[in-house]
Amino acid sequence: MLVVCNGMSRSGSTLQYNVVCNLVEAAGVGMARGGAENDGGPGPDLAHMDPTAPMQVYKAHDALRGTVPWIADGRDGVRICYIHRDLRDVAVSLRTMQGGDDDNILHLLDAAVLAYGELKRVRHSPYVLWQRYEDVVADVLGATEEMARFLKVALPAETIDKIAADSAIDGASKVMDKIRGLLDADLKHADPGEVRRVRKAMRERSLTLRDPVTLIHWNHISRHRGASGVWRTELPAQLADTIVERYAEWFADAGYATDDTHGAAEEGVET
């Protein structure tokens, strides 16, 4: 059984991936397999998909090739967990974690909306769980219970409680702090040239260090701690207006209000 945590970038897809992995591993019905890509990277082989086999859990931002048609045809063996977020907050998070100019941000949002459109074809399938970031972070336990029901994973309530707590912002922050602590410890023994190279990459947000188990990056959580609506103070008004205009159909379909964009910052704020 293939399970793809196929969420939008910077929208809780890592949280969703860790919840799902912990659920299936705690129940003894599957295992985490890490990130998957359509090209040039590891991924599942649908040609040999067995609905009765243990769950193989992958994380991906793009719709993996073949998965949507598979589900659209009503075939068993593939499950998709999807999560999305207000694109304006996605833009803030991308600017914080990855940097880049507005054109780069819009390019990344284009990819996110494209994947949303592909996956929307099977949104109402019983093999697809469609979640909203704002709802998940507001009630991580409820979202964890929803994922368990979707995957038909039966676990004691106290186990689900712990999985939810470990996957929420405080638990993820502890993982991130551990990664940064290990990085700082390594730099203490590095030569000055290597220290400067790494520090420069950190400033430019091009360092891709992450925990191999949880896939949490060294700078995964911003000072906003995953809060929603921060675009009102952190996103330049011009970029906010561009996003609303460029993705008007997406906002309407996803159910996000766009009549409050005038609240965006007049100038970009350092994040």
Image (cartoon, grey):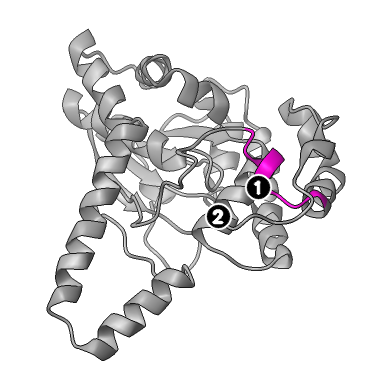
Residue at coordinates 54% horizontally, 48% vertically from top-left? 9
Residue 165 point in image, percent of width and height: 28, 24
Looking at the rendered structure, the number of numbered marks drawn on it comes to: 2
Residue 16 point in image, percent of width and height: 41, 34
Q: Amino acid at mark 2?
A: Thr
Where the N terminus falls, by quadrant?
Answer: top left
Residue 31 point in image, percent of width and height: 23, 39
Task: State which region is magenta.
Answer: 229-237
The Cα atoms of the two marked residues, 1 and 2, are separated by: 8 Å
Label 1 Cα neighbours within 10 Å, binned few <14 / some 14-19 / many ≥20: many
Q: Secondary structure at mark 1?
A: helix
Can residue 59 be seen here? The reply is yes
Where the C terminus falls, by quadrant?
Answer: bottom right
Please, is residue 220 above or below residue 163 in the view? below
Determine whether, in the image, residue 241 is placed left or right of residue 53.
right
**Circle 1 sits on which residue?**
234
Q: Which mark is residue 271?
A: 2
Determine whether, in the image, residue 188 is placed left or right of residue 83.
left
Residue 56 inside the magenta-drawn segment: no
Label 2 Cα neighbours within 10 Å, binned few <14 / some 14-19 / many ≥20: some
Rendered image quadrant of residue 102: bottom right
Residue at coordinates 37% horizontally, 34% vertically from top-left? 169
Closer to us: 200 or 4: 200
Q: Amino acid at mark 1?
A: Glu
Q: Are marks 1 and 2 in contact (CB under 8 Å)?
A: yes
Closer to us: 141 or 171: 171
Q: Earlier in the sequence, mark 1 or mark 2?
A: 1
Please, is residue 12 above or below residue 152 in the view? below
Residue at coordinates 74% horizontally, 25% vertically from top-left? 255
